[in-house]
Image (cartoon, rainbow, N blue to C red):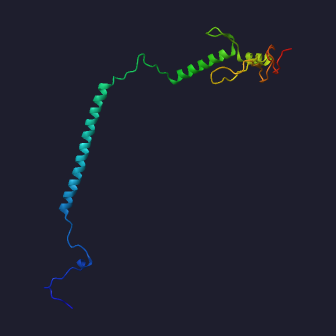
């Protein structure tokens, strides 16, 4: 059936729940401008506060701390070639001390390590008195400790130095 054109016909989209008005563009534009304006204002304010705090703190530190300068004489730095040369010289000097006879700065004598090892192998290590653990007041418990040999056995009190086999007397 056809109706006459004088009647206002209702929009079928309204019956389905759709809105019939358009968006309010001017309201959305005003809200967006206000939001972004607030963001810019906040960033500028934060930057000014940070600059003020930095300058305030720098002023306090400058008043309380003396200027930092290295003490004279200034450190002399080496390049890699000089460092390697110095290390080679040090190792040559150490090798010379370990392999030659001579007198140390404190007046004691030194012998080569190889010679010292031969002497110990030939003569052994002399007897050393065993240490006795102390009690709480610091005194030793046993005063009649016998000297021990290189292998840990005890030798009688008047016996000579221990031999290479660890015996108590020399023949």
Residue lying at the far bottom in this picture: please name it. 1
Query: As rendered, which of 26 and 170 lies closer to the eye?
Result: 170
Residue 159 percent location from the top left of the image: 81, 14
Q: Quadrant of residue 169?
A: top right
Residue 80 percent location from the top left of the image: 52, 24
Is residue 56 positioned above or below 69 on the image?
Answer: below
Residue lying at the far top in this picture: please name it. 107
Residue 9 percent location from the top left of the image: 18, 82
Query: As rendered, which of 145 and 51 lies closer to the eye?
Result: 145
Is residue 11 positioned above or below 126 on the image?
Answer: below
Residue at 64% from the left image edge and 8% from the top image edge: 107
Residue lying at the far right in this picture: please name it. 171
Is residue 143 positioned above or below 51 on the image?
Answer: above
Q: Quadrant of residue 70?
A: top left
Is residue 83 positioned above or below 42 on the image?
Answer: above
Q: The C terminus is located in which quarter?
A: top right
Query: As rendered, which of 114 and 60 lies closer to the eye?
Result: 60
Residue lying at the far front in this picture: please name it. 137
Residue at 24% from the left image edge and 48% from the top image edge: 40
- Number of dots carrying numbers: 0
Q: Determine whether, in the image, residue 50 is placed left or right of residue 30.
A: right
Q: Determine whether, in the image, residue 143 is placed left or right of residue 44.
A: right
Residue at 62% from the left image edge and 16% from the top image edge: 93
Q: Determine whether, in the image, residue 163 is placed left or right of residue 53.
A: right
Residue 20 percent location from the top left of the image: 21, 73
Residue at 70% from the left image edge and 15% from the top image edge: 112
Q: The N terminus is located in which quarter?
A: bottom left
Query: As rendered, which of 60 and 32 lies closer to the eye?
Result: 60
């Amino acid at each position: 059936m056809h109706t006459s054109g004088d009647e206002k016909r209702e929009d079928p989209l309204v019956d389905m729940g759709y809105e019939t008005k358009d968006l309010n563009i001017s309201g959305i534009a005003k809200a967006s401008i206000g939001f972004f304006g607030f963001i810019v204002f906040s960033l500028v304010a934060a930057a000014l506060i940070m600059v003020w705090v930095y300058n305030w703190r720098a002023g306090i530190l400058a008043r309380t701390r003396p200027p930092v300068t290295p003490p004279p004489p200034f450190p002399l730095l080496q390049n890699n070639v000089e460092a390697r040369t110095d290390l080679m010289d040090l190792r040559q000097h150490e090798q010379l001390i370990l392999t030659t006879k001579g007198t140390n700065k404190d007046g004691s004598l030194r012998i080569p390590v190889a010679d010292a090892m031969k002497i110990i192998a030939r003569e052994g290590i002399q007897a050393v008195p065993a240490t006795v653990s102390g009690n709480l007041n610091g005194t030793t418990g046993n005063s009649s400790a016998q000297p021990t040999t290189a292998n840990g056995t005890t030798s009688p009190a008047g016996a000579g130095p221990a031999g290479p086999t660890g015996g108590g007397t020399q023949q």
